[in-house]
């Protein structure tokens, strides 16, 4: 079994980030390091941190290779949004020509950009750009209440 030495600065950072880092996976890695700094075995660390023994070894290897900086890195990036490049032009287009339905917006997005998206993704995109354009959230027309009378 390899021996790991943790500097006081490392221990302070681990102590802080095992609860306060914004990403839960990094918190989990910091918890493993904290338990290792307390002299526990890999089997005990795996049980207490609720990870596999292989994950414990992998996190310790990351720490040995690059220190806390490597532990804080997340290896995945996610997919780039193809509509993000067209956001400004689509926002201008929809301010000039507000769509009456999601299907109409879907057709306009495909015509303007060549990117075809499903209705759910189009709705989410419209909500995103309408929030930026200053549109008010919720319904576009006021609802009738029990006290209001028809005006006709």
Image: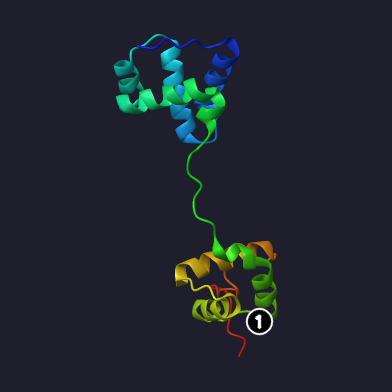
At a point 33% along the width and 17% down the height, the residue shown is 42
At a point 56% along the width and 74% down the height, the residue shown is 143
Q: Quadrant of the N terminus?
A: top left
Q: Position of residue 29 (x, y in %)?
A: 45, 27
Secondary structure at badge 1 equals loop
Q: Quadrant of residue 151?
A: bottom right
At a point 33% along the width and 13% down the height, the residue shown is 41
> In the image shown, does 125 or 101 lie closer to the viewer?
125
Q: Is residue 135 visible?
A: no
Q: Quadrant of the C terminus?
A: bottom right
Q: Is residue 8 visible?
A: yes
Q: Position of residue 53 (x, y in %)?
A: 31, 24
Q: Relative to 42, say whether 104 is above or below.
A: below
**Residue 151 placement, left or right of 76:** right
Q: Position of residue 95 (x, y in %)?
A: 69, 75
In the picture of the structure, the residue carrying the numbered disc 1 is 97
Q: Residue furthest bottom?
A: 152
> In the image shown, does 141 or 111 lie closer to the viewer?
111
Q: Residue furthest front?
A: 65
At a point 67% along the width and 77% down the height, the residue shown is 93
**Residue 48 placement, left or right of 63:** left
At label 1, counting other C-alpha atoms closer than 10 Å, the crowd grade (few under 14, some 14-19, many 20 or more) is few
Q: Relative to 50, say whether 34 is above or below.
A: above
């Amino acid at each position: 079994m390899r021996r790991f030495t943790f500097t006081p600065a490392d221990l302070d950072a681990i102590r802080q980030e095992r609860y306060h880092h914004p990403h839960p996976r990094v918190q989990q890695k910091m918890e493993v390091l904290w338990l290792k700094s307390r002299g526990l075995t890999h089997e005990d660390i795996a049980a207490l941190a609720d990870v596999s023994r292989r994950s414990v070894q992998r996190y310790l290897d990351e720490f040995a290779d690059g220190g806390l900086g490597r532990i804080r890195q997340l290896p995945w990036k996610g997919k780039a949004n193809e509509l993000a490049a067209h956001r400004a032009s689509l926002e201008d287009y929809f301010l000039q020509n507000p769509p009456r339905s999601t299907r109409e917006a879907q057709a306009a997005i495909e015509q303007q950009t060549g990117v075809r998206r499903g209705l759910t993704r189009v709705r989410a995109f419209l909500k995103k750009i309408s929030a930026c354009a200053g549109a008010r959230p919720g319904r576009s027309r006021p609802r009738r209440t029990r006290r209001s009378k028809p005006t006709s």
